[in-house]
Amino acid sequence: MLRQKNILMAGLALLISSAPAYGARPNPQQALEAIKAGNGRYLSGNTTHFEVNKEKREISASDGQQPVAIVLGCSDSRVPVEMVFDQGLAEVFVVRVAGNVCGLSELASIEYGVKVLQIPLIIVLGHSDCGAVKAAVDSAVSGAVFPGHLPGLIHQMAPAVAAARRTHPDQKGNDLVHSAATSNIWLAASEIYGGSTIVKNAVFANKVKIVAAMRDLKSGKVTFLGEYPQPVTVVTPGRK
């Protein structure tokens, strides 16, 4: 594992050293508003980014990419990230894995987006009725056993399931799965922040926001759950 991490970090250092210069970037709040507006267009059907013409392809190939957001999302085919946020070619930097977990490869990809591409927003996007989360809940509640490498994935989500069961001891079935999915989003957000000095420094410098979000499969609506860590409110002495 240490060797793998050293190889990834060496590669990241090489990419950083050869990174192109970029123009003005949106600040984190502007990026978030753009993403929210995109989901609004998606819900209304007034989408603007579903077609990619030859000029757009050629510009992105020659001038590089300037995505507005990094999205760590689930591999579920019902959650196409660009469509959900009505973003086009080269406008979102998407990291997808079942259960939107954050392992070493996912974290390195996010670091690349922050450090090299200067992306101001990280969204951890979970969704309702997540099969990976259901598997993790079944494993914890009934001891269900899964084949192949699935136990490793389930192990990554186990803390989120445990937290949901502690917080909602009476929940079962779909209610517990939803609570576990929400906890799993926050778990991934904490792992991004806690596992990366690159990301943490960018958050401290107000260059990046980490935002948790949940998509409802039936309605398509994305609910933004808040930031991680919670913004600190500074109180000036003598003022309320």
Image: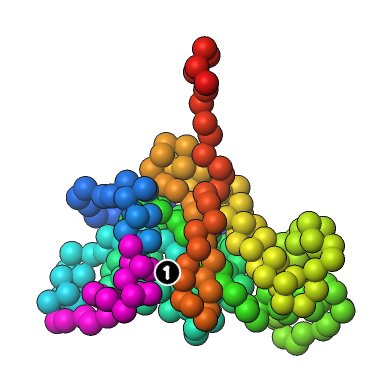
Residue 4 spot, x, y in % from top left? 58, 63
For the residue marked with disc 1, what is the amino acid?
Val
Residue 42, by quadrant, is: bottom left
Task: Give the crowd class for mark 1: few <14, some 14-19, many >=20 residues within 10 Å.
Answer: many
- Look at the image and tell me in which quarter the N terminus lies: bottom right
Q: Residue at x 79, y 61 (%)?
A: 168
Residue 178, by quadrant, is: bottom right
Q: Is residue 72 visible?
A: no
Q: Is residue 211 visible?
A: yes
Above or below for 86 versus 159 = below
Q: Residue at x 42, y 47 (%)?
A: 208
Task: Tell which residue pokes out farthest to the right in this image.
Answer: 142
Task: Tell which residue pokes out farthest to the bottom in this image.
Answer: 147
Is residue 50 shown in magenta? yes
Q: Residue at x 36, y 48 (%)?
A: 29
The span picked out in magenta is 37-54
Above or below for 146 versus 155 = below
Q: Is residue 80 left or right of residue 63?
A: right
Above or below for 3 versus 27 = below
Residue 167 spot, x, y in % from top left? 78, 57
| Mark 1, secondary structure of its residue | strand
Q: Which residue is mark 1?
A: 94
Across the whole image, how many numbered discs are drawn on residues?
A: 1
Residue closer to the observer: 81 or 108:
81
Residue 103 spot, x, y in % from top left? 60, 64
Residue 11, by quadrant, is: bottom left
Q: Is residue 236 left or right of residue 67?
A: right
Is residue 156 shown in magenta? no
Residue closer to the observer: 94 or 5:
94
